[in-house]
Image (cartoon, grey):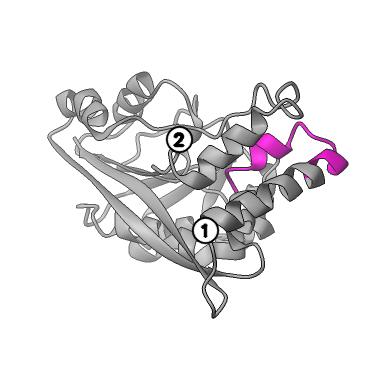
């Protein structure tokens, strides 16, 4: 799966807002070491650096293209190319911050306690993940991928997943001193001829397009576009509202 920083950043402001909301809930005054796990193009890493300018900031991502962009955004930070599922720090961080990344990984009952175990005493794990996998947008992608024309080529494609809030409470509460869980719906105002499709091409659609040839990608997108337009019609001014659920957790040792 190949990430495209420019396409991802097409909706940079909308993608940044949940990270800003998560950042506002972190109860740390002066952490020495901060990790942005799944840092992408570095725009969220810059928020972390702005809040804690004296901290050692490290961004970790599995995409070389994203890290190349991140180094331009924040040259003073450290960046590591690594599988975020198995990444281990050389020094225990005071904060592991992960925005819209961990839903791509499996086995959250094992992953989240492991991340907590990497923290320094008194550390914080702060996570935001999409929680809209049952939305019409995502359901339509799965249904199209399962159609006879695409089923064989896309048999292994997946868009990630999250557990329910009670599951995260059960997984995390025994390991931390304080735990905050919440969710928010972001009613995103998008514009353009196919705005929801454009949004999804930056993230959710990547594992579905990756196995296809360029011609097949165009055919898949052409089949999906009218279905998305029907599910999310624009108004007379050309604005399309795209509701997007996000889930948040802040676990404090």
Residue 103, numbered circle: 2
Query: Quick one: label 2, few (<14), some, or many (20+) residues within 10 Å?
Result: some
- Return the residue nearer the eye: 153 or 171: 153
Residue at the location (60% across, 58% down)? 229
First along the sequence among labels 2 and 1: 2
Q: Eyeballing the image, is 124 above or below 15?
A: above
Please give the range of residues in magenta: 202-217
Tag 1's secondary structure?
loop
Residue at the location (63% across, 70% down)? 192
State the image coordinates of residue 211 (x, y, percent, origin top left): 76, 31
Tag 2's secondary structure?
helix
Which residue is identified by label 1? 232
Query: Quick one: label 1, few (<14), some, or many (20+) residues within 10 Å?
Result: some
- Return the residue nearer the eye: 121 or 157: 157
Question: How many numbered circles are shown?
Answer: 2
Q: Answer whether residue 46 is visible to the viewer in this image.
A: no
Question: Which quadrant, please, contains the N terminus?
Answer: top right
Left or right side of 62 for 37: left
State the image coordinates of residue 142 (x, y, percent, origin top left): 58, 33
Instruction: Give the CA distance from mark 2 to mark 1.
Output: 24 Å
Q: Answer whether residue 126 is visible to the viewer in this image.
A: yes
Looking at the rendered image, the disc whose residue lies closer to the viewer, 2 or 1, is 1
Left or right side of 253 for 162: right
Residue at the location (19% across, 35% down)? 253
């Amino acid at each position: 799966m190949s990430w495209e920083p420019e396409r991802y950043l097409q909706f940079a402001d909308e993608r940044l807002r949940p990270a800003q909301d998560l950042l506002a809930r972190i109860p740390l005054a002066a952490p020495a070491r901060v990790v942005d796990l799944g840092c992408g193009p570095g725009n969220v890493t810059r928020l972390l650096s702005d809040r804690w300018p004296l901290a050692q900031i490290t961004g970790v991502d599995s995409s070389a293209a994203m890290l190349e962009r991140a180094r331009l955004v924040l040259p003073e930070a450290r960046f590591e190319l690594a599988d975020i599922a198995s990444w281990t720090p050389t020094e225990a961080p005071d904060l592991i911050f992960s925005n819209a990344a961990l839903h791509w990984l499996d086995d959250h009952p094992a992953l989240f306690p492991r991340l907590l175990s990497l923290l320094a005493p008194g550390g914080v794990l702060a996570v935001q993940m999409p929680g809209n996998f049952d939305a019409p947008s995502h359901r339509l992608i799965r249904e199209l991928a399962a159609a006879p024309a695409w089923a064989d080529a896309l048999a292994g494609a997946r868009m990630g997943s999250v557990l329910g809030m009670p599951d995260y409470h059960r997984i995390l509460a025994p390991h931390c001193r304080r735990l905050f869980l919440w969710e928010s719906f972001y009613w995103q105002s998008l514009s353009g001829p196919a705005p929801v499709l454009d949004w999804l091409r930056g993230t959710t659609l990547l594992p579905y397009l990756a196995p296809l040839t360029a011609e097949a990608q165009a055919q898949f997108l052409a089949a999906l576009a009218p279905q998305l337009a029907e599910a999310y019609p624009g108004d007379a001014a050309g604005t399309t509202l795209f509701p997007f659920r996000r889930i948040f957790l802040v676990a404090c040792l």
